Amino acid sequence: MPSSSCPCEGTEYKRSAMKRYISKATLGVVGTALVVPALAITTAHAAPVQANVEVAQNYDVLVVGKTTGFRHSSIDEATTAIIALGEANGFSVDVWDPPTSERNQGQPERSLASTPFTSASDLAKYETIVFVSTVDGTNNLDPAKPTLLDQSELAAFQGYIRNGGGFAGVHAATDSMHTIPWYSQLTGGGARFVSHPEQQNAVQVVEDSTHPSTEHLSGTWTRFDEWYNFNQSPRDSVRVLTSLDESTYDARGNAMGADHPLSWCQNFESARSWYTGGGHTEASYADPVFLRHLLGGIAWSAGAVSGGGDCVTWTEVEETTADLLAEAAISSQAATLLAKQLDKAQEFADAGLHDDAADKLNAAAALIRAHVDGDSDAYDLLLGKVRDLQDWQSGLQ
């Protein structure tokens, strides 16, 4: 099995790969809205849902529905929905969902004839890759169990991510490749699926409505689905977008308690990574509110839309500062002063005082201007990330 660490994992690599942007000139920006068409998968006939954000078009998405373990019946509906979203929003969709067994027939009429995971350069044609409930049966952590991607395919995927490719995971994307720690970090900061209760209504708390996948939501979001319990909360590593209120449903065994994230985003290595735990039911893919959530995640991971500070986290800025200090790209004085401002800003943010947090981050930006060489890469990198945090906190006011 390939190592979960990058062979180029030095501080210089980490610094340069912390965040990726796609050229809007390359994608072709238009001033239209993300559009969710009404889909007649069930009896839903809702009007299209729109979000008035700047959207880049003409990009390519790969949907992976391949399974070698339990197969979700909704994978076909999810694929149909993503294809329709692409048609309405200017992105093309390839599908890789080959038959793998008598039980797992896949979608051969839609699937690419052979694996697209041949090399990082071959995968680079896609702005993002969407894993839809890609269960491979490795949740018993048996190292001898074959993983969804074989050794060669995984190396291609890792190269794609490290070169700036996007990732979006849906539902059981966290129930795949359990024996590959790198993949669990990509999908959710180490969080992996462990169990679920029966399908039922539950309330999600919308923690961050500044992201393109949640900007149409506010307060709480109630829906019927299959609600995952994870082996740990990923909160320290990711930006939590929604979380489950366990008092509103029966989580049964492995309940996570007060901290139960369900959807999140992060800047992982060079990639934008987004995940939602929803999407088990076929009806999810006729629900315009869920589809708007899914579309926002796909478009953001592709770099076609931005918002809310683009998922920069406190931990990400702390790690960037530490890397720059280790490289002697900034002084110890600058690092110490910045750490104090960031700690104060995070204290305000954790207390719900987002206006005060934004003010502290503005002070942190001024500190960078005063103590870091304005002509250096370190200046641009660090100031950009602090400004992203400030945009996020300003949007939460």
Image (cartoon, helix red, strand yellow):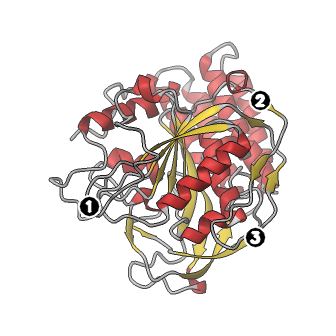
Residue type, numbered disc 2: Val
Alpha carbon distance from label 1 to label 2: 44 Å
Residue at 42% x, 39% y is 112
Image quadrant assignment for residue 231: bottom left
Residue at 57% x, 50% y is 265
Residue 163 in the figure: left or right of residue 392: left
Q: Position of residue 20 (x, y in %)?
A: 58, 30
Q: Quadrant of the N terminus?
A: top left
What label does residue 102 carry, if any?
1
Q: In the rendered structure, which disc, 1 or 2, sits on the residue that comes first in sequence?
A: 2
Alpha carbon distance from label 3 to label 2: 31 Å
Residue found farthest to the top: 375
Q: In the rendered structure, which disc, 3 or 1, sits on the residue that comes first in sequence?
A: 1
Q: Quadrant of the C terminus?
A: bottom right
Residue type, numbered disc 3: Gly
Examine the rendering and report whether any part of residue 65 can be seen. yes
Please give the residue where the numbered disc 3 appears in the rendered image. 219
Please give the residue where the numbered disc 2 appears in the rendered image. 29
- Disc 3 vs disc 2: Cβ atoms closer than 8 Å? no
What label does residue 132 carry, if any?
none
Residue type, numbered disc 1: Glu
Residue at 37% x, 64% y is 71
Q: Position of residue 286 (x, y in %)?
A: 65, 65
